[in-house]
Image (cartoon, rainbow, N blue to C red):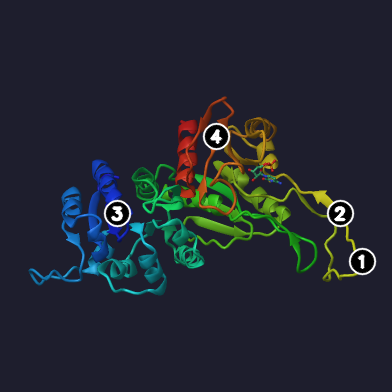
Amino acid sequence: MRGKRILLGITGGIAAYKIAFLIRLLKKNGADVKCIMTPASTEFISPLVVSTLSNNPVGIEFWNKKDGTWNNHVEYGLWADLFIIAPLTANTLSKMVQGSCDSLLLATYLSMKTKTIVAPAMDLDMYIHPSTKRNLAQIEKDGVEIIPAEIGELASGLTGEGRMAEPETIFSAIEAIVGASNNDFLGKKVVITAGPTYEALDPVRFIGNHSSGKMGFKIAQDFLNRGAKVILVTGPTNLSLEDDNLSLIKIKSAEDMLSEVQNCWKNCDFGIFAAAVADYRPKNQAIEKIKKKTDELTIELVKNPDILNWAGSVKTENQCLVGFALETQNLLENGAKKLEAKNLNFIVMNSLKDNGAGFGVDTNKITILDNRNNLQSFELKSKEAVAKDIIDYLKTYIG
Ligand code: C5P
C-alpha cells in the first residue's frame, strides 16, 4: 500500500462515520489519501475529521467560496491509483448510472482514469429494491467493482442486508487491487477455467448450470495484476476482461474446454480450474430443433471428460494444480477425496449451505486443503479478496 494514491469519495449515509477508521487503516499502511465529500455527507462526518485524518484538504464543492479557487475533478481523476466510494448511497448510485454530475464527487467519477470501487450502504428495503439492484448491476457492467453490503443491524433499527462492509473488509478489497500489483508472478504462465459449460441438445437448447464465472475471472484479474500471463478458458458468461497478458478463450461445451486446456497445459506453471463443468452431456445432438410431440421425452446422457482429472494425470513436478469443490454435504470428506483422486496440489472448497457462498453472488467463503495435509478456513469475503487469498496461498505453497 506504501505510496499508493487512494481517492476516497464519501456520500451522505449514516455509515459515513465509519470512514474515519478506513482512512486510519489506509494511512497506517502507507497510502496517500485524498477525500471528496458530497455536501450531504458533511452532516454525518465532519470535513475537519476527514481532513485531519487524511492529512489533505477535503474537496466538497466545485469551487472554494472562501478563496475563489476551484477543485479540479480532472486532476483528482489523474492523481488517483484507485477511487473508492464509501458509503455509496442509493442517490449517488442512481446518478452514477445516469452519468449525472451535479457534485464534485460525481464529476470526479466521470473523470476517473483508473478503477472505481464502491461500498453501498442503505436500509434493507432500499438495498433490495429492484431499482437499486438494477443500478448496481449497471455500474458493475460499466466496470465498477462492488463490495457487497453485509447483513446486520441497521441504523433504522431493522436487521437485514444493507449495512456497509466493515472498514477492514473495504481495506482488504482496496489492498487486493492496488497492493497486489507487485509483479510477484512475473514470468509465470497460468491456465484458468471459468464459468459453466453448455451441452447442446439441439441447435437451440442446452443443458447448463448457474455458474456466473465471477470467481475464475477474479482469479485471472489478480494473476494479471501480479504480472503473470493468463490463459482464461471460459464457458458462456456476461463477464469481460482485457489485458495485454491475457488470452481469453471462449468455449461452450466441456469437450471444447478440454481441447483448449490440452493445447496449453504443458506450457503452464499453474492450473486453476474454477469452471462448473457439466458432468454429463446429451448422447446425441439433434441436427434440427427437437419437435414437441410426445408427452414424455427421455434424454440419454453420457459422461463428460473430467478436465481437471486429465490435467492431474499428466502434471509434472514443476506444475501446480488447483481444483474447486462446491458441495452441499460432507464438504471436507468429498474435498479430500477429490484432492487425491485428481492429483491436485490443493483444493478450494466451498459449501452451497454457507450464506453468501457459491453461484452468482459476489462473495465466497472458502476452505483450502493441500496435499501436505494443511487445512485453512477463510472468512466470508468479496470474490476479489478470495481470489487474492487463493493466489497468496499458492505463493506460500510454492515457497
Ligand atoms: O468432481 P467435481 O466436478 O466436483 O470436481 C470439481 C473440480 O473439477 C472443479 O475444479 C472443476 O473445475 C473440475 N472439473 C473439471 N472437469 C469436469 C468436472 C469438474 O475440470 N468434467
The x, y position of residue 262, in whole percent, is: 67, 48
Mark 4 residue type:
Ile
* Spatial separation of the CA atoms under disc 1 and disc 3: 61 Å
State the residue position of label 3.
Answer: 16
Q: Do labels 1 and 4 touch, CB within 8 Å? A: no
Judged left or right of residue 214, residue 326 is: right
Residue 183: image quadrant is top left
Name which of mark 4 and mark 2 comes first in the sequence: 2
Q: Do labels 3 and 2 touch, CB within 8 Å? A: no
The x, y position of residue 298, in whole percent, is: 88, 57
Mark 1 residue type:
Thr
Name which of mark 2 and mark 1 comes first in the sequence: 1
Residue sitting at 47 percent across and 55 percent down?
Answer: 245
State the residue position of label 4.
Answer: 368
Residue 346: image quadrant is top right
State the residue position of label 2.
Answer: 300
